[in-house]
Amino acid sequence: MSDAEMFGARLRAHRERAGKTRAVLGGLVGRSGEWVKALETGRLLVPRLPMLLRLAEVLGVSDLADLTGDQSMPVASVTRAGHSEVGRIAAAIQHSTVPVGEPTSSKALTALVDQAWRIWHGSSTERTAVAEVLPGLLDDARRSARRLEGGERRLALVELARVYHLVQLYLAHQPHPELVWLAADRAMAAAQDADDPCAIAAAAWYYAHVYRSSNMTDAAEQVLMDSLPLVDPDGGHNSLALRGLLHLGTALGHSKAGRTGRAWRAWDLADESARRLGSGYVHPWLMFGETVCAVSAATMEADLCRPGEAIRRAAVIDYSALPSRTRRAAALIEAARAHLARREEIAAVHLLGRGLRESADTVRFNPFARAATLELTSRRGTTGEDARELALAMGMNW
């Protein structure tokens, strides 16, 4: 077999193991199903490094050697840069003993956690900003959840779950994937110990993120749907937002797996909740509302290999209605992904630059943004020049 044929056989094996069709894999890396077929049958040469990295990320391949058969190159070494404080956060979550000292009252703890979430959503360098408070906040929440009693303990457990959600967000796209799982698991355990339906629903939303990132879309749907009956549909704004969020997570999982009909049925249920909440409503820390539903619809169109529809939806989104720098930056990255799938490279670079201005940390540590920028630095003319400037701003070497 030629090198191209051997690469194609490995690619097909990893694609089938991940449960993705050729069309879905092609759409997720900005190419067509026919392009994937040509790779798998050896009719095309092995792609260049940036595209190999994108394929590996989508398929959950941790070492490029598993695709290429060449010398080892951990995918995370290129696509997942480590934040300067990641060691401190990793050490904080790995502590096995409860910190000494007096517990913090549930009311004071809620105020501290609310403040940390405002920092996360309001900063253009959210990882750097939240790293200043996260280790101490985690100690406070763990201490209070262990030492308070009765209703106070239950409230402290709810706040502990919210702190673990922040830890999970901080660790996302960092070179510690096992700790992302640990944060999600501990958040769910705290929510269940609190016996709080809304806390369990929020933990399910974040657990589903981890499952989807590992191509475990059925497991993601299961954890979301298991939590849905727990949340009262008539329980007020918070309950309605959480039910909408559970449906939205289900929709995102189905679209990633290429299940068009099921994806849009779930999205319709999420959008119905958002509309019932009103056009001005945004959940204070989960950010659920009409704008998040609109952003998710654009993401789903891109996942379902309809980049033109994704671009059309993204073009009419009022990003200013989303009061979170990191969520706005993530939405702009998704819009860039759709444009890149249409070979509209100038638009993709522009949108990644806009995203960087919204939140440098979100773009700097996003695997797609890093791989796409690396790919675009090789272009001639203005596109390549702008991409190289973007790469420098992201702290990348190429």
Image (spheres, grey):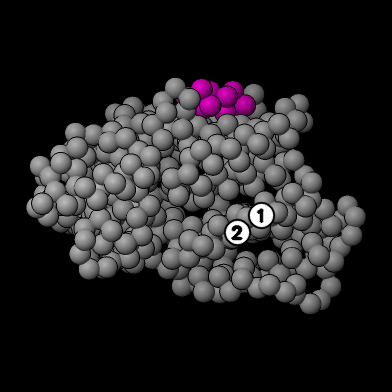
Give the percent coordinates (x, y) of residue 234.
76, 26
Tell me which secondary structure the magenta stretch mostly adopts: helix
User: What residue do we see at 77% from left, 44% from top?
Assistant: 196
Q: Callout 2: few (<14), some (14-19), or many (20+) C-alpha neighbours within 10 Å?
A: many
Task: Look at the numbered disc 2 and give the secondary structure of its residue.
Answer: helix
User: Dot 2 corresponds to which residue?
Assistant: 183
**Residue carrying label 1:** 187
Where in the figure is residue 116, as x and y percent of width and height? 64, 59
Please provide the residue range marked out in magenta: 264-274
Quadrant in the rendering for residue 340: top left
Secondary structure of residue under mark 1: helix
Query: Which of 166/350 is in front?
Result: 166
Query: Which quadrant of the structure image shows residue 129?
Result: bottom right
Q: Position of residue 112 (x, y in %)?
A: 72, 60
Q: Is residue 383 left or right of residue 323?
A: left
Quick check: can you spot residue 344? no
Q: Is residue 391 left or right of residue 262?
A: left
Task: Please give the count of numbered marks on the rendered protein.
Answer: 2
